[in-house]
Image (cartoon, helix red, strand yellow):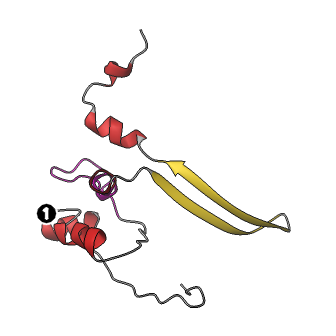
Amino acid sequence: MSALPGLTTTYQHLDAGFDFFLKSGTALPESTLDALIYKVDCALFGAVSSPTHKVMGYTSPIVKLRKELGLYANIRPIRGTWQGKPVDLVIVRENTECLVLSIVKDISDFAVR
């Protein structure tokens, strides 16, 4: 990834995901959270592996990150072409839906009566 002119970047690998869970017993170690909170100005979160079935003790690192850091949106910049025309677009996607569902034990609390 190239930096903007005049912008200095450094990259730091941080552990998270199912593969890390299999090695350590946690999908999002405190060292990753500490680095995100205290040591970096920006983070790019790539794809992480997830189990295809329920695994005892495993919780999504993405959901935990959203809770711990108070995150509520994905920002997805898009620049390219579509049907030969230039596209320069930013999509802001709200992400709190899974936070509510992971906290609520009985979805019927939200049922329309």
Residue at position x 61%, y 65% in the image: 77
The answer to whether residue 15 is visible is no
Residue 19 occupies quadrant: bottom left
Task: Give the residue drawn at x 54%, y 50%.
Answer: 93
Where is residue 106 shown, x and y percent of the image?
Answer: 27, 25
Question: Is residue 59 highlighted in magenta?
Answer: yes
Question: Residue placed at 48% from the left, 90% from the top?
Answer: 8
The kind of secondary structure the magenta stretch mainly shows is loop
Magenta residue span? 49-65
| Circle 1 crowding by C-alpha within 10 Å: few under 14, some 14–19, many from 20 | few
Q: Is residue 110 left or right of residue 34?
A: right
x and y percentages locating residue 101 in the rendered image: 34, 36
The image quarter in which residue 17 lies: bottom left
Q: Which residue is mark 1?
A: 25
In the image, residue 89 above or below residue 23: above
Task: Tell me the quarter of the picture where residue 24 sits.
Answer: bottom left
The C terminus: image quadrant: top left
Count of numbered circles on the image: 1
Does residue 36 belong to the magenta stretch? no
Q: Circle 1 sits in a helix, a strand or a loop, which is it?
A: loop
Residue placed farthest to the top in the image?
A: 113
Q: Is residue 46 left or right of 21 when viewed as pictured? A: right
